Amino acid sequence: MPIRRKPKMSAQASLLPGVRIDKTSNRAVYLQLYAGIKQLILEGVIPAGASIPSPRLVASEFGCSRHTVATAYDFLIAEGLLSASHGVGTFVSELVETALKAAGSNPSAGPTDAFIRQSQFADILERGRIDRDEEDPLQIFGAPDAECFPYTLWTKIYASIWSNPKRELLHVTSAQGYDRLRSAICTFVHGTRGIRATPEQVLITSGTTQSVDLLLRALLNPGDEVWVEDPGRPKAATLVSALGLKRVSVPVDHHGLRVDVAEQLAPDAKVALVTPSHHYPTGATLALERRLHLLAWANRSGAWIFEDDYDGELIADGHPILPIYSLGKNDRVIYLGTFSKSISPQLRLGYIICHPELARRLVRLRFYVDYFPSMNLQPVLAEFIEKGHLDSYVRRMRRIYRERQSTFVAAIEATADGAFEVFKNAPALFQPLGLRDERIGNNDVILAERARKLGIPAFALSSFSFNVKPRPGIIIGTGRLPLERIPSAVNRLVQATRDMQNIITAAEESS
């Protein structure tokens, strides 16, 4: 291709405007020159066909050797950004102009919606997000109190394992999870949840969300129907829709999922996704009669029950309620557990307990999804459980959470003048409150936002409804409220509620 010559660049100021060399840097000078010239070319500052100053002139300006400059030029020639002609000079390649036009008139502009056309799967997930800042601790009302965790003990176990790791640990790549952890989980759930399981029935995951995603992909086809509690978990419900499954919203009352309504709406559904021990987020316990009804439906129709027992071992009011999985014949029940509530969501460890044949199939599928779970913390958690530390910690936190929740409820009932309906059998880490004043109920999102501004972990109850008429209320993260802070937190919450009532009343009177 003939070279289109242009006048050489002026050497009056800088031969390469914008290029800076830092000789104190650990980065080689030729690499700094290479990067600087490349940026000028790609940004169009040095246009296609323009002559590049000779290595001698550039070396003189930047105080380096001609060899250093020539090396930088060689890199750019190898990339096709420069072309050299013996006896003529070095020029910006004509191909650069063509490439920049193909990339767009403004190559430095950021991605746009037109540029990134995301999939329908991603679109549905995006639309299903609730308006919550996941990095704001006041909006994550269901998080445990991480300050109570025995970090010194955990660190000691970690160091004992990984300061001089056994050879077997350095080569474990089990898609099912570390065998000692799976055995420890079997022991733990038998003691806390009455579940009898063997290690081959356990699959380690990164948490309940991955467990649900893996199971839905493994067992269902697009168009299959899934019973979803309404209100319920927005993340799980959105995932169901994004995978091309038909979400069937089933109402929940004080006794849990309305199984009778679910059968009327979709008798041939393939999965029931439920939180029977503690409905999320109201705390309702699925009545025994409905549990048996649900089991009978699953066994009769060949459907699956995904039992999300997100805080089973931490139930604060009385003794832990046993899961459906422990009722007897449970081949159609898949138990989903997590350590996000008992320890911390930062641990990113959960588990599935299911029929051994299903576990084997999930392992094969998991190989293509993320290969195997991270091994770093699995042996640490295994020993933490084996030595009884988790059991002791859970018992201690259960007492702490129960005391915090009962103190909060007593303060609300004593000072709120009946403004709130206190939900019974609340989950261990948070307390749902219904709003009796319907005028405020329609603005529970605003009330929750005001509560957070006052330093109270809170979220609107209505945000968890899908198709069923939203139940207005506010959810308070009592698990992270120290006892000494509860009276003032309740006073601030009650005052914020009264302020909203006054504002609404004034607006009604003025209109």
Image (cartoon, rainbow, N blue to C red):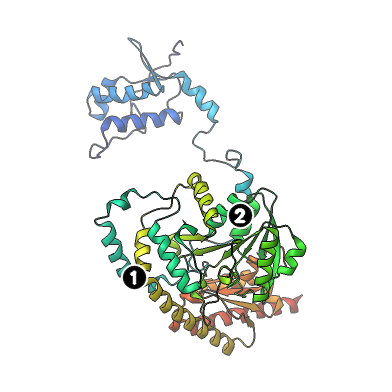
Q: Position of residue 295 (x, y in %)?
A: 65, 67
Residue shown at the point (37%, 63%) measured from the top left: 382
Q: Residues within 10 Å of mark 2 (few under 14, many from 20)?
A: many
Q: CA distance from mark 2 to mark 1?
A: 37 Å
In this rendering, the answer to whether 133 lies above or below 51 is below
Q: Earlier in the sequence, mark 2 or mark 1?
A: 2
Q: Nearer the viewer, residue 278 or 326?
A: 326
Q: Position of residue 136 (x, y in %)?
A: 49, 64
Q: Nearer the viewer, residue 305 or 418?
A: 305
Decide if residue 333 is on the left or right side of residue 468: left
Amino acid at the residue labelled 2:
Leu
Decide if residue 247 is on the left or right side of residue 236: right
Residue shown at the point (53%, 74%) measured from the top left: 430
Residue 387, label in figure: 1
Q: Nearer the viewer, residue 317 or 408?
A: 317
Label 2–label 1 contact, CB within 8 A: no
Q: Quadrant of residue 237?
A: bottom right
Q: Secondary structure at mark 1?
A: loop
Residue 147, label in figure: none
Q: Nearer the viewer, residue 271 or 361?
A: 361
Q: Secondary structure at mark 2?
A: helix
Amino acid at the residue labelled 1:
Lys
**Circle 2 sits on which residue?**
239
Q: Position of residue 249 (x, y in %)?
A: 70, 62
Decide if residue 290 is on the left or right side of residue 106: right
Q: Going by the picture, which residue comes out furthest to the bottom? A: 414
Pair 2/1: label in front: 1
